[in-house]
């Protein structure tokens, strides 16, 4: 083989490997996002394990619960509980009863194992359902509702938030937290996520909004809001 032909063969092989590599990374990316949205099967079990053990996830969930200032008799609902870190934290914080909903059966099993003692003690109820089909058992009223890195996966999030507002007691608190996980995410990505959540909450009729930031890389934002009191006009703002 001449040197020129050799170079062409090597270049073609490298190009093929690079293309295959890019395709594999893209497929993995799709799979990672898919598993974060709805953990299923063996890959879902690994995803749940990563959620439960990643230091940033643990810190993020602890922080969000600390922002809610849960009261001892408080009834709290978490949407998208994943492996159940925030549920465990809420129990530790002394919540009266913690309810949770997640559409992943794999996450239900992991969160149930993590919170087995509190479930046996009647302090935790976990439900396997999607957020757009809230079961009657979760009608509330709740003193607080939270969602950590989950809202971005919900269908029609403004409608979902308005439904959740109706399940809060007057003055009840909502916490929506997000740490952008897209490649290259920066503080600006987190700020944009906060703006988007604030707009959704405004149009869903929430009041008393404030945004807190946990300085991780990228920063975690948590938008806190309240359900208006009984005399308020509940018409969503557009
Ligand atoms: C990125 S994980 C976050 C899990 C957990 N909150 C945490 O921070 O460790 C998103 C979770 O939201 C759940 N989820 C996503 N879309 C949902 C939906 N439409 N209804 C119910 N749960 C949903 C997923 O099953 C997953 O457990």
Image (cartoon, grey):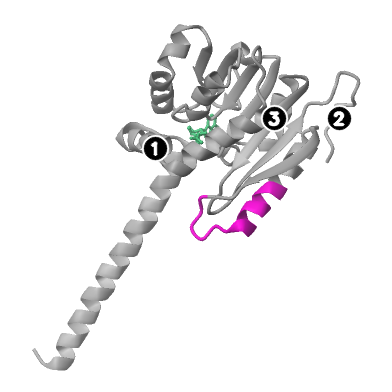
Q: Can you tell me whether the CB of the residue at mark 1 lies under 8 Å from the nearest atom of ligand 1?
A: no
Look at the picture and state if 49 lies above or below 10: above
Determine crowd level at label 3: few under 14, some 14-19, many 20+ residues with C-alpha closer than 10 A.
Answer: many
Q: Secondary structure at mark 1?
A: helix
Q: Position of residue 113 (x, y in %)?
A: 38, 19
Q: Earlier along the polypeptide chain: callout 3 or callout 1?
A: 1
Q: Earlier along the polypeptide chain: callout 2 or callout 1?
A: 1
- In the picture, residue 14 is in which quadrant? bottom left
Q: Position of residue 180 (x, y in %)?
A: 55, 49
- Tell me the tag on residue 183: none
Determine crowd level at label 1: few under 14, some 14-19, many 20+ residues with C-alpha closer than 10 A.
Answer: few
Look at the picture and state if 150 lies above or below 114: below
Q: Residue 156: tell me if it is visible.
A: no
Q: Residue at x 53, y 11 (%)?
A: 123
- Tell me the tag on residue 174: 3
Please name which of the two marks, 3 or 2, marks the residue nearer to the observer: 3
- Would you say the residues marked 2 and 1 are in contact, meaning their CB atoms lie under 8 Å apart? no
Q: Residue at x 29, y 63 (%)?
A: 20
Q: Earlier along the polypeptide chain: callout 3 or callout 2?
A: 3
Q: Which stretch is magenta?
A: 181-195
What residue is disc 1 on? Answer: 53
Quadrant of the snapshot with the C terminus: top right
Dominant secondary structure (helix, strand or loop) of the stretch shown in magenta: helix
Q: How many marks are shown on the rendered structure?
A: 3
Q: Residue 121: tell me if it is visible.
A: yes
- Tell me the tag on residue 235: 2
């Amino acid at each position: 083989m001449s040197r020129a032909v050799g170079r062409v063969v090597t270049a073609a092989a490298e190009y093929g490997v690079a293309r295959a590599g890019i395709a594999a990374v893209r497929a993995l990316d799709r799979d990672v996002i898919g598993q974060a949205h709805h953990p299923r099967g063996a890959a879902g079990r690994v995803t749940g394990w990563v959620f439960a053990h990643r230091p940033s996830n643990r810190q993020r969930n602890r922080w969000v619960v600390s922002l809610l200032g849960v009261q001892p008799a408080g009834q709290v609902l978490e949407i998208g509980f994943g492996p159940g870190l925030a549920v465990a934290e809420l129990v530790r914080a002394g919540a009266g009863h913690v309810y949770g909903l997640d559409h992943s059966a794999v996450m239900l099993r992991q969160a149930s194992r993590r919170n087995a003692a509190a479930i046996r003690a009647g302090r935790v109820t976990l439900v396997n359902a999607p957020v757009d089909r809230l079961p009657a058992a979760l009608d509330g009223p709740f003193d607080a509702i939270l969602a950590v890195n989950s809202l971005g996966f919900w269908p029609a999030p403004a409608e979902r938030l308005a439904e959740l507002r109706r399940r809060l007691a007057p003055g009840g608190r909502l916490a929506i937290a997000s740490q952008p996980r897209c490649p290259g995410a920066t503080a600006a990505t987190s700020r944009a996520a906060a703006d988007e959540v604030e707009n959704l909450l405004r149009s869903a009729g929430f009041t008393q909004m404030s945004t807190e930031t946990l300085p991780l890389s990228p920063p975690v934002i948590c938008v806190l809001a309240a359900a208006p009191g009984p005399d308020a006009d509940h018409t969503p703002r557009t």
